[in-house]
């Protein structure tokens, strides 16, 4: 695909800014929509997103705007990089503005409480006439704009959308893989935030490499179990959007959710941590939704249960850790024929 497109990236956070830069560098006309008019004006004038990516200039081809109609009305491809709590409201606003042939991709990693609704399902509900996709993977925005080698995943039932996104985002330092399991890819992006909190807590408490390795692999087992119960393909979790994103988010203090967990491990109260973060940590909200759904479906998720007990049931980390280690024995690898 070689034709030049008009592309809108909705959401002025770090990841939205990073992919807008790649798209513009590839020669496509690119709008970066920011909800706050002053932030958009400053980004356009200063050629920098000073709040989220200070020190990294915007590509010349990126136009920052707070005018939603200007951004969306001309675009053949729209990325929605909005936090989950306001995702649906923005989607409803763009519905009457979209071109009939426009394709829409979610990059948000969260779950809407009502009906355990993932963000691409929100797009399906609000934009039923448009091709829908999900972009997810181990993608720290600061490393993307610094042109470090990065891989991500585009998932959609639409071959045209997959090819379009791969063409728009492909570069010498950013590789886009395809996966037809949109639900699994999106679940991976949402679930790993929970386990990043767990691993951050463990790190703050002085956990060694043995502990971290156990936490990562058992987290992956829980994710696959839950995905299978929800109708996704557990094999998706062996790819970039599953284990790749899990490793990244659970082992780096660049992850907001890891930092939340680390602060919890230091004994700080959750409300204070969230207030001081200045950005959304999706894992806290996702934990509530996943715990409820796992209970409904009777899915064995001891790490989710344990973290929920620490955050919302006033149980001590030490007591929860002891129960996890002394709890019922389980098989190491899922889907090998053993009774789960």
Image (tube, rainbow, N blue to C red):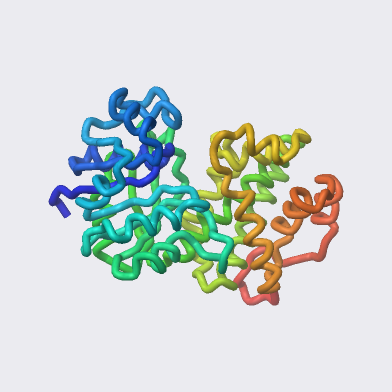
Residue at the left extreme of this rendering: 3
Quick check: 137 above or below 100? above
Q: Is residue 152 above or below residue 129?
A: above
Counting from the top left corner in percent of width and height, residue 56 is at 36, 26
Judged left or right of residue 81, residue 285 is right
Q: Is residue 308 visible?
A: yes
Q: In the image, what residue occupies the spot 42% across and 67% down?
A: 181
Q: In which quadrant of the rendered image does the C terminus lie?
A: bottom right
Residue 203 quadrant: top right
- Comparing 88 with 24, the one in front is 88
Q: Position of residue 314 (x, y in %)?
A: 82, 49
- In x, y percent, where is residue 15? 41, 41
Please tell me which residue lies in front, 160 or 122. 122
Residue drawn at 60 percent across, 42 percent down = 257
Q: Position of residue 306 (x, y in %)?
A: 76, 55
Indicate the quadrant where residue 112 lies. Answer: bottom right
- Tally of numbered tags: 0
Instruction: Say whether residue 277 is left or right of residue 269.
Output: left
Left/right of residue 315 with respect to residue 169 in the rendered view: right
Q: Residue at x 49, y 62 (%)?
A: 118
Residue at (20%, 48%) from the top-left corner? 6
Whether residue 162 is visible: no
In this rendering, is residue 149 above or below 122? above
Task: Work out which quarter of the rendered image holds the N terminus and state it.
Answer: bottom left
Who is closer to the viewer here, 281 or 96? 96
């Amino acid at each position: 695909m070689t034709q030049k497109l008009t592309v809108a990236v909705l959401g002025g956070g770090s990841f939205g800014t990073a992919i807008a830069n790649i798209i513009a560098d590839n020669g496509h006309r690119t709008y970066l929509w920011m909800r706050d008019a002053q932030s958009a004006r400053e980004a356009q004038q200063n050629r920098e997103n000073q709040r989220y990516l200070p020190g990294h200039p915007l590509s010349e081809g990126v136009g920052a705007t707070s005018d939603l109609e200007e951004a969306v009305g001309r675009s053949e491809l729209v990325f929605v990089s909005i936090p989950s709590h306001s995702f649906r409201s923005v989607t409803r606003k763009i519905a009457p503005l979209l071109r009939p042939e426009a394709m829409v991709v979610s990059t948000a990693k969260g779950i809407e409480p009502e009906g355990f609704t993932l963000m691409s399902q929100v797009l399906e509900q609000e934009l039923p006439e448009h091709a829908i996709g999900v972009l997810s993977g181990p993608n720290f925005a600061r490393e993307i704009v610094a042109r470090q080698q990065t891989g991500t995943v585009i998932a959609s039932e639409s071959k045209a959308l997959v090819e379009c996104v791969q063409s728009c985002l492909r570069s010498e330092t950013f590789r886009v893989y395809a996966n037809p399991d949109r639900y699994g890819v999106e679940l991976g992006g949402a679930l790993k935030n929970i386990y990043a909190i767990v691993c951050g807590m463990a790190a703050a408490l002085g956990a060694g490499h043995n502990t971290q390795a156990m936490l990562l692999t058992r987290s992956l087992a829980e994710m696959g179990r839950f995905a299978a119960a929800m109708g996704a393909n557990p094999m998706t979790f062996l790819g970039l959007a599953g284990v790749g994103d899990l490793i990244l988010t659970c082992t780096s203090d660049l992850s907001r959710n890891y930092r939340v967990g680390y602060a919890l491990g230091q004994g700080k109260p959750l409300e204070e941590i969230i207030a001081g973060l200045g950005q959304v940590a999706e894992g806290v909200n996702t934990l509530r939704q996943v715990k409820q759904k796992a209970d409904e479906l009777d899915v064995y998720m001891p790490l989710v249960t344990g973290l929920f007990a620490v955050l919302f049931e006033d149980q001590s980390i030490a007591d929860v850790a002891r129960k996890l280690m002394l709890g019922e024995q389980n098989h190491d690898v899922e889907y090998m024929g053993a009774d789960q």
